[in-house]
Amino acid sequence: MTGGILSHPFALAVLAALSLTGCSQSGARASEAAPDRRMALKPCRLDGVAAQTLCGTLEVFEDRAAQQGRKISLRVVVVPALASQPKEDPLFFLAGGPGQAASRTRILPALDRIRRQRDIVFVDQRGTGDSHPLDCDAMNPSRASLAERFEDREDADVIPQCRKGWDADERLYTTSIAMDDLDDVRAALGYRQVNLWGISYGTRAALVYMRQHPDRVRTAILDGVAPMGQYLPLYAARDGQRALDLLLDACAKDGVCAKAYPDLRARTEALLAKLTAAPAKVRLAHPRTGVVEDFTLTRRVFLSELFALLYSPDVASLVPLMLDRATKEDWTPFVALSLGLTDEVARTTSRGMFMAVVCAEDAPFFTEEDAEREAKGTWFGPRMALDVKRACAKWPQSNVPKSFREPVKSDIPTLLLSGELDPVTPPPWGEEAKRTLTHSLHVVVPGLGHNTVGADCARTLMADLLTRGSVEGLTPDCGAGLKRPPFFTSFAGPVP
């Protein structure tokens, strides 16, 4: 979802998931093993965070059912609790995407309150990060020239090329298999029970783990909920249009924004019609190199980038300015914003693992007719879902359990968090998941997009859930004073 939920149209899912990563020398606990710990951990250093951190690997069979053949190594990072006698149940972080590497995110600063009493554990899911990654440069939008960066091509065209570089059976990189890996990690680290925190696609992973290993979960936090009834990216056009409509309506109701960008919706519709008739021929200086370049921009690529900009309200506050300039054939803001998303996506995600998941767990469950129906009346149209269907036609067929798409039923204490403005996992998906989670609380945080951990009240709810071990007594209101960031009316920022 990514993501945060991620393919090219979902680039910001990764950024929206904030992130972890950083390690320095260990303290006293570095040399101490839990009484029944079977995994060797050593002090390690990761980028960006000077935290006491331990790293290790766990070997598992790629084919878990056969229990023979190729073995793969799973990357495990443990950030020890600050307390001298920490709680026995750690927090396991499940990253978004699909395809994000948990150990390369930068989410740790958001967990200060939880880390006081509990270890924080990051496991690169098989196919991501340093866990036998299914990386693919050809599917990576982070390309040097603007012509390459904004090239209109489909993943289906490059999948065969990518697969040649993998020593892997791509059919074995699905969520159900990965969650059994995760339970092996839990056991090897000596934890009897864990608390789960999933973001975006990580919420699906958490739900699957809750179903497969219910006795091992003390509590669960699902942020940006992707329940089993959500097929990626079938509903993306509809949910993305909702977020875009909320943005355009907010601008129209804001006196300053409306004055700066009059008739913005109508002018944007006219721009899309123009791009449909003929792609834009653009010449401008590359924002990083200063070299003047020429490239062609299609409606599809423009909308894919626009979709990604909606994940974060802070980034989205620049969208009216960008749209206004684009309607005047000034593409500089569009290019600058789009390039700003690219590096982090490339650094933290595996596009091959994205394909492995959606081609097994999503694409088989919807038709092209479904895609046309769900996208009807939206600017984004069915192209995102159709592209996935076409790409998956060139992917090895994989089987998931017959019950995989059934709603997860559980009485595990679960906190569901949704951002009001989320373009890919909006609040109705949290409500859907809640129906079969009998001991759950769903909180919608106003003014936020994909993932809510940026709000202090959401972090407080997370910490309180882990302290109580129950949703009983948690305050359902969160961020009553929060609202969408003010819109930029110039590159200098919003009008005071």
Image (cartoon, helix red, strand yellow):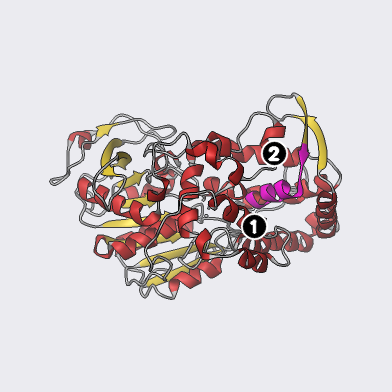
Residue 218, compared with residue 357, is above or below; it is below
Q: Which mark is residue 98?
A: none
User: Disc 2 on helix, strand or loop?
Assistant: loop
Q: Which mark is residue 484?
A: 1
Q: Is residue 390 visible?
A: yes
Residue kind at label 1, given as amino acid type: Arg
Marks 2/1: CA–CA distance: 32 Å
User: Which circle, 2 or 1, is nearer the viewer?
Assistant: 2
User: Disc 1 on helix, strand or loop?
Assistant: loop
Residue 434 horizontal/vertical position (percent): 44, 72
Mark 1 crowdedness (10 Å alpha carbons): few <14, some 14-19, many ≥20: some
Assign the magenta stretch its main secondary structure. helix
Which span of residues is magenta-colored?
296-308
* Residue at (25, 60) in percent of width and height: 216
- Seen in the image, is 235 located left or right of residue 410? right
Q: Is residue 460 visible?
A: no
- Seen in the image, is 178 located left or right of residue 363? left
Residue at numbered disc 2:
151
408 in magenta: no
* Residue at (81, 36) in percent of width and height: 282
Q: In the rendered image, which quarter is residue 30 located in? A: top left
- Seen in the image, is 83 located left or right of residue 272? left
* Residue at (24, 45) in percent of width and height: 68
Badge 2 or badge 1: first in the primary sequence: 2
Residue kind at label 2, given as amino acid type: Glu
